[in-house]
Image (tube, rainbow, N blue to C red):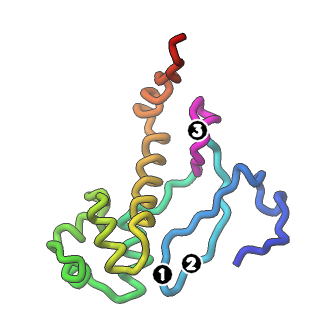
Amino acid sequence: MIDDAASDQDLGCRPEQCVLSFSGMTAEAKPWEYVSTTTAADNGGGTMPMTKRKPATIGEVLREDFMQPLGLTQGALAEAMGVQRKHVNELCNDRRKVTAATALILARVFGNSPNFWLNVQQRTLLWEAMNSPRERERIKRARRVRAVA
């Protein structure tokens, strides 16, 4: 539970530099934690929040926050999703990305929103892009488009 009386000093960052991080929505929800962030603006971009630590991947969230607490095997989840076990195995081992269709299926199976699953995927993709030297160079070369008068 978050103490509303906590000051900015307690958090170790200014409010605009803090985001709340939640690893997943389960029957036994994990506590919220404050994560100090930098923004893409600090790196020459917009205002996208970036954490210093890698966010939980789809596989980690699926395994640790959903399957383990519910006692689900990959086979049982595959059956509930109406997909092959290989599909679930690839999700659990981060060898498959969540598509819109998969997000809709997971949301139906676990009773949450498709946006939850897409956001988990998007956080991982953004973090990987911002922490890859090759991608950072590509991003650095990009320039804002100005209207021609």
Magenta-drawn stretch contains 41: yes
Q: Secondary structure at mark 3?
A: helix
| CA gap, disc 2 and disc 3 | 28 Å
The residue tagged with tag 2: helix, strand or loop? loop
Q: Percent x, y for residue 64? A: 42, 76
Residue neighbourhood size for the residue with mark 2, other residues' Cα within 10 Å, grouped as few (<14), some (14–19), many (≥20): few
Q: Residue at x 38, y 83 (%)?
A: 68
Q: Nearer the viewer, residue 54 or 102?
A: 102
Looking at the image, which residue is at 41% across and 49% down?
125
The residue that label 1 is drawn on is 26
Report which residue position mark 3 lands on: 40
Q: Quarter of the image containing the N terminus?
A: bottom right
Q: Which residues are magenta?
A: 40-51
Earlier along the polypeptide chain: callout 2 or callout 3? Answer: 2
Kind of residue indicated by mark 3: Ala
Q: Residues within 10 Å of mark 1 (few under 14, many from 20)?
A: some
How many angstroms separate mark 1 from mark 3 (CA)?
A: 31 Å
- Number of labels in the image equals 3
Residue 29 falls in image quadrant: bottom right
Residue 27 is situated, as x and y percent measured from the top left of the image, at: 49, 86
- Label 2 with label 1: CB-CB less than 8 Å: yes
Disc 2/disc 1 C-alpha distance (Å): 8 Å
- In percent of width and height, residue 146 lies at 53, 18
Q: Is residue 98 left or right of residue 6?
A: left
Residue 81 falls in image quadrant: bottom left
Left or right for 16, reference 124: right
Provide the residue designation for mark 2. Answer: 30
